[in-house]
Amino acid sequence: MTERKEHELILQEQWRRRLLRGEIDRRQFLSRTVTAGLGMAGVGVAANFGMGARSALAARPLTPTFYQWIPDLHPAIPEVNAGFPDLNFQIAPVEGFGIERFVAEAKDQKSTWDVYVGMTPFVEMTAMIEADVIEPWDNYIPKEVIDDILPAIREECSIDGKLYSWPFLLDVIGMSWHAGITDQAGLGGMPPEDWDAYLAAAQTIVDSGAAPYGATFDAHGWRSLAPFTHSMSPDVYTSEGLFDFTSDAAVEALILMKNIMALSNPDILLAGTTDGGVNGTPDELAFAAQRVGLYTKYFNAPLRMAQYWDDPAMLSMGGLPKFKGGAGSTVFWTTGSALFKHGENKEKAAEYIQALTYNPQIWQDSIAGTATAHPGQLPPYASIYAGWNADRPDWLPPFVDLVRGQLDRARAIQNHLFGLQQFVIGKPIWETYLTGEESDPKAALAKVVEAVQAEINRGG
Amino acid sequence: MKLTARMNAPSRPRSSEERAQWARANVWLFLLPALVFFVGYQVWPIIRVVWISFTDYQFLANEPANLVGFANYAEALTDPLMWAGLGRAALFTAMFLPGTIILPLLLAILVDRVRNQRVATVYRVIILIPAVIPSTLIFVLWKWMYNFQVGPINHFLVEVLGVFTIQTAPQWLGGTALTLPSIAIMEVWWGLGYHTVFFLAGLAAIPKELTEAARVDGANEWQIFWNVTLPALQPIMMILIVLRFGTSMAVIDEYLIFGGFDRESPTYTWTIFMYDQAFKTGLWRQGFAAAIGMIGAVFMMVFVGGLLYLFRRKG
């Protein structure tokens, strides 16, 4: 009996401390004390807390909200969550990158959530800042963490020197191929170093009958036109931060797309089947069905699609080919976390995101794959790569060094309110060249610039 | 006695004028819940959208909205995307609407002629199956059916019939010219049972004496159909046409799922244009988007007015 009493008092003291720290609210405190048999004694403790307790009573548990695909692809996230008792883990209402709920709440100076994990800087970061939804992490992120972020990624996640996105999952556009198909076609010297060799290899695949299609790509501009352009030159942004569609590099990229299309699946330009046509694209299906030899997209895609192959070990990956004499760059982006301006628990949110982004199991699962997923997304921190270099884990595949190497030359699409939309608006216009409706690639791209400017200037 | 008088005095109106007032008050009391719902849920949002359409309201901007008069309407009416969008929606309606009348009508007449009640019930249940499948499943099913690379329709055309090759097979969805007819076929199939039930109800309401009298007068089945059945079903047809005209002109989910935001796609109708402006592009110009919505609504109301005039009860 005495032992039990002592145990109850220890528990009571623990919960009292957690109540004062704001980790649990009054209701949780009372229900736990009653459950533990403390009854009115616990209620008395709660009543004696004074002003300090009142602020704790108003507090809520840390409430992060995730874009659905992230917990789907990263099964070790619950392991991180287990280190944060009372965490109110939620899935965000952002199907198709829709941020309207966040904006609507910010207009009322409130937020249901504390942190959103799922923001891609060039897609929605500027809009979230314009709408006063998010605030920079700089006051909460430890200095050693901010210094650990790879410089190109830090630049991607910052506006006016302030870090608005705490980077998490890194995607880089590269090249992959089906070794079974390329071997059957008699192709040696993979991967091709430049686009001419790439096209020649694709032609060989078709001519040999090893696969119906030689090569494919995702027709969305940020996944094909922009990285192909960067492979010649990444300096293709206007002073406003928009993509320079009429640059020589962009024109060459468009011509390249047309050349690849001649050897690709005929439905390559069709809209995808999910997320408003953005995902579930025909290139993925062609690669998953082993109907195409060569593929350019962020590595996450071939890794996912190869799981449907007869032998997933046939997947090989390499850097994006370049134009002869080109810069050999590509496009990358991170999916990161945004701190809600009107959220709560900001210090706690930083603590959680730090634990999440440094969790070794998440990175091992992401890179080596699990029974359920193989996203192939990489960490944004220099120290993690340094650790792997110093003591290389046996599960670390060579593509990690490759992606890391590409990152030194890769560049993110610049942040702008029309960062994504400029490619959505332009796609049907530059496709007039790809389908043969317009014979001059530069003329087609000039019309894209006009259309994007017209949209920006709408309503004066 | 006193107590009774006190209780009766305030609650029971004595004169006929008081009783009439009391009755009127009662009417409003009972109407109040419905009125609150109607005003709050239907009238107020419409008024709000009309008001927004006259402002420069941008959802992502923090500045207050300013009245801009008819500027949004003028901009929308001079925008080629608005007219292209209305045209595409009208084209889809023209493909879809006949399928909501002709096929269900034929099917209803066939089912109505089945004399065995058990068999008739089985037919009715089978016909209704698509109507009770949730929309998500319908979209997943038809996306797979229409898939260019692995869909059963193209498999049949390429591998079984050999009328196309893997290079030339039809591209049913994703923004091609076939996308609108493909969606229309899906919608007609989906609504077939539901629309057939309307006609079955209409057929059941036609007095048997009418058709029997026509037969006695020597009319054949074809003449009975044209001169008795079809005129009797006209009110059902009017209801279906008016209802389905509104829904087909204002389709948005299917276009978002099967076409995306490609502005040259046949699925980029005025509803997608409105959504694109309100939730996707720039600072989300919801004032402009509201004007697009109002123009679309007025366009539909004028057309529905024309339909009602066409189907008016003559004589």
Image (cartoon, rainbow, N blue to C red):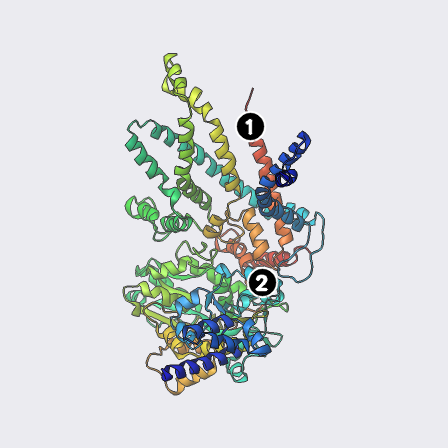
Callout 2: few (<14), some (14-19), or many (20+) C-alpha neighbours within 10 Å? some
What residue do we see at 34% from left, 48% from top? B154
The residue tagged 2 is A105
Residue at the bottom extreme, as displayed: A390
Quarter the C terminus of chain A occupies: bottom right
Relative to A307, is A99 on the left or the right?
right
Residue at the top extreme, as displayed: B217
Relative to A127, is A358 on the left or the right?
left
Cα separation between marks 2 and 1: 48 Å
The answer to whether residue A458 is above or below residue A306 is above
The residue tagged 1 is B310
Q: Which residue type carries mark 2? A: Glu
The answer to whether residue A295 is above or below residue B181 is below
> On what subunit does the disc labeled 1 rest?
B
What residue do we see at 44% from left, 56% from top? A272
Provide residue A165's location: percent of width, then percent of height. Answer: 54, 73
Q: Which residue type carries mark 1? A: Leu
What residue do we see at 44% from left, 73% from top? A34
The answer to whether residue B200 is above or below residue A429 is above
Secondary structure of the residue carrying numbered label 1: helix
Provide residue A105's location: percent of width, then percent of height. Answer: 58, 62
- Of circles 2 and 1, the one toward us is 2
Residue B292 visible in the displayed image: no
What residue do we see at 52% from left, 60% from top? A98
Quarter the N terminus of chain A occupies: bottom left
